[in-house]
């Protein structure tokens, strides 16, 4: 996680495949949101590759919004954000 002027950025979040579908990703995102609030940040930001459709669905289900999409190395990077305070 990186604290910036415009909020906290979750730079990388991954769950070992054998531990996926057990809620660990949700718990890590919730923890990052809690850290952001404690640090006085009003927004949490993250990005993911559009090919990781499950990630996009997860973040949308956690009330993240798509801010923008940008082409990157033949793919699409999806920038997302959530207001946390």
Image (cartoon, helix red, strand yellow):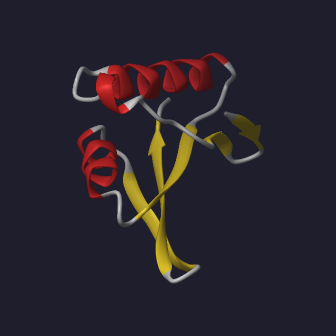
Taking depth in this image into account, of 54 and 62 the one nearest to the observer is: 54
Q: Please state if 13 lies on the left or on the right of 26 as rendered.
A: right
Say which residue appears at 66% left-offset and 41% top-offset: 7
Say which residue appears at 47% left-offset and 32% top-offset: 84
Q: Check the image and report above or below for 42 versus 76.
A: above
- The x, y position of residue 29, in whole percent, is 44, 28
Q: Check the image and report above or below for 64 versus 21.
A: below
Q: Check the image and report above or below for 38 versus 61.
A: above
Looking at this view, name the residue that lies furthest to the front.
Answer: 18
Picture quadrant where residue 32 is located? top right
Taking depth in this image into account, of 54 and 31 the one nearest to the observer is: 54
Say which residue appears at 24% left-offset and 20% top-offset: 22
- The x, y position of residue 20, in whole percent, is 29, 29
- The x, y position of residue 62, in whole percent, is 30, 37
- The x, y position of residue 54, in whole percent, is 26, 50
Taking depth in this image into account, of 56 and 3 the one nearest to the observer is: 56
Q: Quadrant of the N terminus?
A: top right
How many numbered discs sit on the rendered protein?
0
Taking depth in this image into account, of 40 and 4 the one nearest to the observer is: 4
Say which residue appears at 47% left-offset and 35% top-offset: 14
């Amino acid at each position: 996680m990186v604290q910036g002027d415009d909020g906290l950025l979750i730079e990388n979040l991954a769950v070992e495949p054998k531990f996926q579908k057990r809620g660990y990703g949700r718990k890590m995102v919730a923890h990052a949101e809690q850290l952001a609030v404690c640090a006085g940040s009003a927004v949490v930001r993250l990005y993911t590759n559009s090919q990781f459709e499950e990630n996009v669905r997860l973040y949308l289900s956690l009330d993240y919004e798509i801010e923008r999409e940008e082409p990157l190395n033949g793919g699409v990077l999806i920038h997302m954000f959530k207001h946390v305070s």
